[in-house]
Amino acid sequence: MNSENPAIYRKAYTRENSLIAFQIWEEHQSHLLKKKFDVALPPSVFDVIQGVAAVWYGQDVAQIWEHFIVVRYEQDSQFVKKTMQWYGTNLDILEQIWKTGKLENISQLERFFSLAAESWLGLSISYFLPSIDRLPKDEQTLGMQLRERAVDFLECTDHVLQNTLRGAYRNLGDLVQYLTFQEAITGVQPPAHALQARKQHYIYYDSIVFTDTDIDSFVRTRGIHLQQEIVSEEVKELRGQIAMKGLVKGMVRVLRNKSQIPELQRGEILVTAMTTPDYLPAMHQAAAFITDEGGITCHAAIVARELKKPCIIGTKIATQVLKDGMLVEIDADNGIVRIVEK
């Protein structure tokens, strides 16, 4: 791929997790999918600043996944049911590990890594099933059931990883989240300055960690174009998907990482890329939620319905447009966020 005909990548997610969690993520999509089903996907780009990753996918990734699922189903009408049964069995095992919160020792990490990566294949298939109209309703429903069951797959997996690493490498403190899988299982740690560099910024791409380049230079030299949302300074209204209806007005609080969670005050409007279970204290305090990402089964949507708080998800640009202290009106009956006062 050359600069005249670059590969188009779009931002898929924003996630705050350990480097090993991102390795598990990429292992299932770029390696296990090819090994198990002979389906090739372009490597994802993880651009990670202070542990928060902008995850970029090749623009055709969703279509490739959906095409693969349809073709497999046409070849074998039991493909979906067999795959979801296998995935459900794996989830049984993972859920027991998630409940304990950590592994007994570092020697169990290799098996956990493999189990999580393999299970993620089932997770991805379950994610796409409900939206594939060419599949029977039973298969779509089965996918949705498994999708809802594992809505916190990444967070639960990452908690196990970080808790286990902190126990095994107490000298590193929070820097354990910047260890690679290979470094963790061998015990051969990089110098502290290398981990500090990763904490500031790293790019994970095609199984390699890069710390000596910025994202613009990195993608340019690899013939990749990151297609970003163009945001006008004149934006006065955002639209997204309704997760929980309601009408409320309040001051914005933008949370870009987990360390900012205590900053949210009661009655403020929580604005973030996407919530996880770690955000629950802030969600109980907030009057409403607005997210960049997510679908009707995402964490923010589920919690909003439980707490009966207005919630608009999938705005794509809320964290870019909205700033701390802005007064906004959430019209979650119509999926609209209006900026009342900047």
Image (cartoon, grey):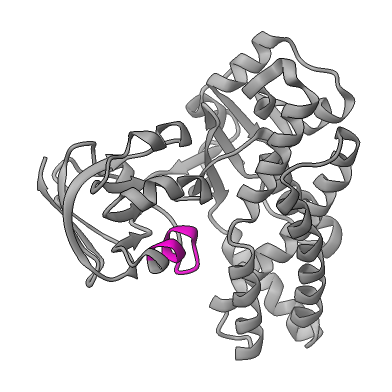
The reply, left or right, for residue 200 in relation to residue 29 is left
Front in this rendered view, residue 14 or 184? 184
Q: Quadrant of the N terminus?
A: top right
Residue 180 falls inside the magenta stretch: no
Residue 299 falls inside the magenta stretch: yes
Q: In the image, what residue occupies the spot 63% across and 86% down?
A: 135
Q: In the image, what residue occupies the spot 44% across and 62% down?
A: 303
Quadrant of residue 218 within the rendered picture: top right
Quadrant of residue 233 within the rendered picture: top left
Quadrant of residue 228 within the rendered picture: top left
State the count of labels. 0
**Magenta-highlighted stretch: main secondary structure?**
helix
**At which x and y percent is residue 27?**
76, 47
**At which x and y percent is residue 295?**
45, 65
- Examine the rendering and report whether any part of residue 317 can be seen: no
Q: In the image, what residue occupies the spot 66% across and 81% down?
A: 142
Above or below for 254 versus 77: above
The reply, left or right, for residue 278 in relation to residue 161 is left
Q: Which residues are magenta?
A: 295-304
- Examine the rendering and report whether any part of residue 275 can be seen: yes
The reply, left or right, for residue 129 in relation to residue 279 is right
Front in this rendered view, residue 170 or 314? 170
Q: Quadrant of the C terminus?
A: top left
**At which x and y percent is residue 136?**
63, 90
**At which x and y percent is residue 87?**
77, 68
Above or below for 253 versus 131: above
Above or below for 309 versus 339: below
